[in-house]
Amino acid sequence: MSAYVIVNVDVLDEEAGLAYARVAQKSILSHGGRYLVAGPTPEPVEGTWDSSRFVVIEFPDMERVREWYDSPSTCGPGR
């Protein structure tokens, strides 16, 4: 069953953000993931949204998400 990673992010440095995005994309694709949504945060119908970017990534299953997340190629905060 498919599993999804949902990311809310604020990019404070566009140049660094673009460099990060290239590395992240390679890592995601190499673990069987694919981007479903990547871009500015949509306008909510109700309430507020506290980040400026929104990403949804689909993986084949939760095991692949965990392999990706725990891999050395994942370049998230604190890694």
Image: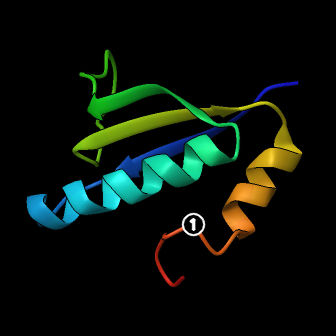
Say which residue appears at 28% left-offset and 24% top-offset: 42
Left or right of 14? Residue 53 is right
Q: Quadrant of residue 4?
A: top right
Seen from the viewer's position, the closer of residues 26 and 69 is 26
| Label 1 environment density (alpha carbons within 10 Å; few <14, some 14–19, many ≥20) | some
- Spot occupied by residue 3 in the image (x, y as percentages of width and height): 76, 33
- Spot occupied by residue 9 in the image (x, y as percentages of width and height): 33, 53
Secondary element at image label 1: loop
- Spot occupied by residue 49 in the image (x, y as percentages of width and height): 30, 39
Say which residue appears at 34% left-offset and 21% top-offset: 46
Say which residue appears at 45% left-offset and 46% top-offset: 25
Left or right of 31? Residue 49 is left
Instruction: Name above or below for residue 59 compared with residue 67.
Output: above
- Spot occupied by residue 79 in the image (x, y as percentages of width and height): 54, 82
Instruction: Name above or below for residue 4 compared with residue 22.
Output: above
Which residue is denoted by mark 1 in the rendering? 74
